[in-house]
Image: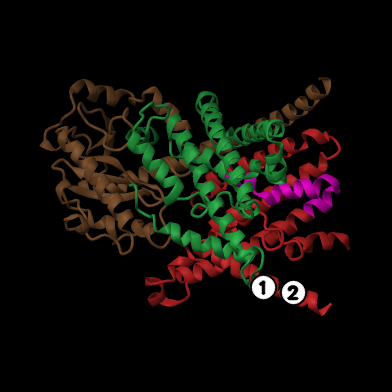
Amino acid sequence: MNAAVMLSALMAAPDAGGSGFDIGRMMAIIFAAVFVNNFVLSRFLGICPFLGVSKQLDSAIGMGAAVIFVLAMAALGCWVVYYLLLVPMGLGYLSTLTFILIIAALVQLVEMILLKYSPGLYRALGIYLPLITTNCAVLGVAVLNIGERYSLGESIVNAIAAGIGFTLALILMAGLRQKLEMADVPPALQGKPIAFLIAGIMSIAFLGFAGMGG
Amino acid sequence: MAEMLKLGLVLMVVSLVAAVALGLVNRQTAPVIAVQQEMAKQAAMTVVAANLSPGDSLAFDSIEVEGLENPYASVNSSLRVVRVTVPPDPQGIGYLFIAYGKGYSSTIQTMVAVDAAGVVAGTTILFQSETPGLGANVTEPGKLIDRLNGITASEAVLTKDGGDIDAMTGCTITSRAVVNSVRAGMDAMDQAGLFSGAAPVDAAHEEAAAEAPPVPEREMAADSALEPAREGGPL
Amino acid sequence: MSLMKDFTNGLFNENPIFRLTLGTCPFLAVTTSVENAIGMGAAAMFVLVCSNFLVSLLRNLIPSEVRIPCYIVIIAAFVTLVDMVMAAYTPDLHKALGIFIPLIVVNCIILGRAEGFANRNPVLNSVIDGIGMGIGFTLAMLLLATFREILGNGTWLNINILGDAYTNQPLLIAILAPGAFILLGFILGVFNIMGNRKGGRR
């Protein structure tokens, strides 16, 4: 018997598309994405905006909100397109291409919405708004959801939790960097180096969450 | 309006060319990938089941078992089990299953071979993405998984949890994931009566398994979803 | 010799990691071992060179308003190509790099060079720029990976350097997430010192 068939039969893989809404599993996903495997401090996704926008608290919160929205919509869109379009047609290998196009379109949409309803935030975010397209976290979450075979509900929860984790790291960093402006940083470490060192220490702190939440 | 259409058209043309080019490459690489995965899976199954009957060539049949709970995934699927036989004897000498344990930074897949009495005959880690240098060492022979050979389900407990198996230094989470997931699978099989010594599967299922692979539609989706499985596993 | 300048640009003056701070996500994630770093560097360089080539070739054909999505499609196509080829012919490396292979698409270096160089320079210059940036990226990763693997595992390219005593109790944090941040911070600090000294002399 074909071993591939054998082993795919062996794999008790979560049936993608299953509607099992297990609150315990959801809580585990949320806790893991926000604390245990924080997307920025542990998985290294979303570093560019993390460094770029974390200089001030207001823009950090605004950026976080925008990213959470894009993450949730992208997770939804990519999951639906993948399982309802690509897989049935045997086009799984086009996933990277379609995902990034979906994300680019979503970011364009968010830009238009912000420009119309919140031009202040639009200006504050500046170049970093279109850069959400190249935010590793957005594409990363979409790919992760497929890899972990999450159902649609789990994918969206994972995406929102990832966004919350990202925003949390961003806000913490912004707060620290605002304080840092008064501190006496050695000239060699001013700017990016000290930011990375702080991120490293924050990462150590988050390591303490390891193993919690099952 | 015409401007937007023209822009949209350019984008569409570029995308189509890209998609077609990728389709051609896929034609080339997909069979290679499939062959490789096939070989890896065969190798894993043969290695793990070897202890069940050393020196004999084995046959693997996927079986459906009534009342077999799935302790791992979401509510819908049941635990898949493969029965090992030494042809031409149809009597099973053991079973193979994959245990899924939520480790530190990944879901660890452990393939386990158990004999008909419920004693572990062999294990191998199919997939893990744990911390390099720590949990990732679980794949090394001589560490955790070898310790699992020869134990029954009730003995698969870490010392930290009251049993006899020592966790690897500094990787309690990884160790616990592997051990507990193996125990969960074996417990489920025990509850379904697989370890009573007699063949548990009814004849109808057996014939169906022998004739054609019982692959429900979900399996097909899962199969072609195997390619981009990043964290979930290589299979 | 402007071609030479385009090449060395990516190595030092505009090193993508240390000067432009682009592409930090894969840089930090993949440098747990030298082997992975080289693999990722090679993959990223391939995509960078190919996309620079194509973008430069088509620079007069793609209308400006829709250029970013088109570049993204081109880059994504090459990334998928690399993904499939690696899955078929280098499965172990493919598994080790995992999610970061499709993430090459959003590696800011590649889109950055397409938008900032390839779309306004001839094909040969763009290819050379791609090679230079790619080598610069790979060398940077090699540097960090060397630190992380030796400190965190006692090995270099899986060759045991510091002996068994060290390998049993290494400085594990170097190979964990915080180590990447901290080591990069110090490396950037050193680069700052070097840059300041040069500036001071002039």
Quadrant that contains the N terminus of chain C: bottom right
Q: Is residue B130 magenta?
A: no
Q: Residue at x 61, y 44 (%)?
A: A63
Q: Residue at x 40, y 41 (%)?
A: A29
Chief SS of the magenta region: helix
Q: Which residue type does callout 1 highlight?
A: Ala
Describe the colour scheme in one phrase.
Answer: by chain
Q: Which residue type does callout 2 highlight?
A: Asn
In the image: residue B152, left or right of residue C196: left
Q: Nearer the viewer, residue C164 or B102?
A: B102
Q: Quadrant of residue C196?
A: bottom right
Looking at the image, can residue B81 be seen?
yes
Categorize mark 1 by other alpha carbons within 10 Å: few (<14), some (14-19), many (20+).
some
Q: Chain of mark 2?
A: C
Find disc 2 in the rendering and name its residue.
C196
In the image: residue A76, left or right of residue C7: left
Categorize mark 2 by other alpha carbons within 10 Å: few (<14), some (14-19), many (20+).
few
**Contact (Cβ within 8 Å) of mark 2 with mark 1:** yes
Quadrant that contains the C terminus of chain C: bottom right
Q: CA distance from mark 2 to mark 1?
A: 8 Å
Q: Colour of chain B?
A: brown
In the image: residue C30, left or right of residue B104: right
Find disc 1 in the rendering and name its residue.
A188
Q: Colour of chain A?
A: green
Determine the secondary structure under disc 2: helix
Which region of the structure is painted magenta?
C102-128
Q: Is residue C125 magenta?
A: yes
Chain in red colour: C
